[in-house]
Amino acid sequence: MIIQPRVRGFICLTSHPEGTAQHIKNQIDYVKSQGEISNGPKKVLVIGASTGFGLASRITAAYGSGAATIGVFFEKPAAPGKPGTAGWYNTAAFEKEAHAAGLYAKSINGDAFSDDIKQQTIDLIKADLGQVDLVIYSLASPRRTHPKTGVAHASVLKPIGQSFTNKTVDFHTGVISDISIQPVENEEDIENTIAVMGGEDWKFWIEELKEAGVLAEGVKTVAYSYIGPELTYPIYRNGTIGKAKDDLEDTVTVLNDMLQDLNGISYVSVNKALVTQSSSAIPVVPLYISFLYKVMKEKGIHEGTIEQMQRLFAEKLYNNNTPTLDEKGRIRVDDLEMRADVQAEVDALWQKATTENLEEISDIKGYRDDFFNLFGFNFDNINYDADTNEVVNIPSIKS
């Protein structure tokens, strides 16, 4: 079928198998160009492995240190006349490339919050790898059914205490407008957001993996977070999502106690603002990123997800490095984003931004390209008017 992008707001409803394969190849080529990560992980579990930082982590582990990888995610398979999700196609392309390179790569598709998927993962590790020496936790979901209580929790994106008004942009049209978001109305909404996006499920995963004996001596586990600039604090870091991120970061202490007898360690890595399916949904953030991209590209310090993860592995976690932590015990690979000179220039652009001057003073085009790249579109070497086979299978998943 011929697959073109169909967009509804911040969601692209279609994805292109050839384009996503190109996106995967570009990331693989980057990691390979950076050379081997010495003393890197060899057997890796990535929870939330099909898009964004989780996918980039899987690619970095595989092609940076030759790691065998198991990926867990929840994606929609392709069917005749119906394209699969981008994450499905991403994983199919990754596994195809990995297998051709002689690398072990298998995947599990299902609700990673559930006990059943945790057990399937444990069974696969036992059967094929024995143990894993790195566990990446990179789940992004708007809802979670609690595996112990059966209660369905839904997250909300709201400020706490007072309403928030600031600029935002429709990144498809380039129209800047003001947006006002009312504060969360009850404590239950905050608790639900923490239940979905906090650290409890990460803790459940590590508990069950350890109990099953599939965590190696010296195991590392890493989850991802974000802080961002002050202008996004009301909607992000000081809002409901921020409460969930606080909970995620506080889980490090619990996990370090749990892993002590294995000489294991857990980290939260604070990453840079980037175009992801999740960040596109947050008001204000797309406009901020369009200015951030312009400033960082002009300074020659821009990074995408794969550059961020390669740097995290090569400069922080491995190569005989012990990561420097901030005052709250977090790894910071948002250090270039948060440089004072970068933030000052972004703030100056923010103050003078209008619909009329946006194309000139921002990198809104780069934002759009990155957004559509997530779904396999806007690659110059792909003919999007040509027929493509939408039914692409993931080699390790039996349909």
Image (spheres, rainbow, N blue to C red):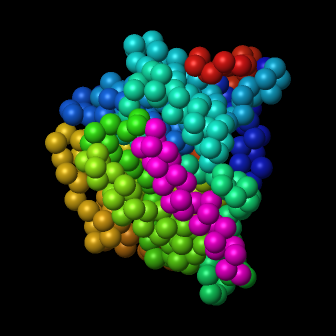
As drawn, which residue projects farthest toward the bottom?
162
Q: Residue at x 18, y 47 (%)?
A: 321
As drawn, which residue projects farthest toward the right?
81
Residue 371: x, y in percent? 60, 45
Residue 129 lies in quadrant? top left
- Whether residue 21 appears in this view of the structure is no
Residue 17: x, y in percent? 64, 25
Residue 398 lies in quadrant? top right
Q: Is residue 120 left or right of residue 361?
A: right
Q: Nearer the viewer, residue 155 or 367?
A: 155
Q: Residue at x 75, y 45 (%)?
A: 7
As drawn, which residue projects farthest toward the left?
320
Residue 154: x, y in percent? 71, 62
Location of residue 279 with respect to 35 vertically, above or below: below
Residue 44 lies in quadrant? top left
Q: Residue at x 29, y 45 (%)?
A: 262
- Magenta segment: does it hold 273? no
Q: Is residue 267 left or right of residue 282?
A: left
Q: How many marks?
A: 0
Location of residue 304 with respect to 76 vertically, above or below: below
Rendered-image quadrant of the N terminus: top right
Residue 294: x, y in percent? 44, 56
Rendered-image quadrant of the C terminus: top right
Location of residue 260 with respect to 46 vertically, above or below: below
Q: Residue at x 38, y 31 (%)?
A: 131
- Magenta segment: does it hold 206? yes
Q: Which residues are magenta?
A: 186-212
Q: Nearer the viewer, residue 397 or 55?
A: 397
Magenta stretch: dominant secondary structure: helix
Q: Is residue 320 left or right of residue 345?
A: left
- Whether residue 120 appears in this view of the structure is yes
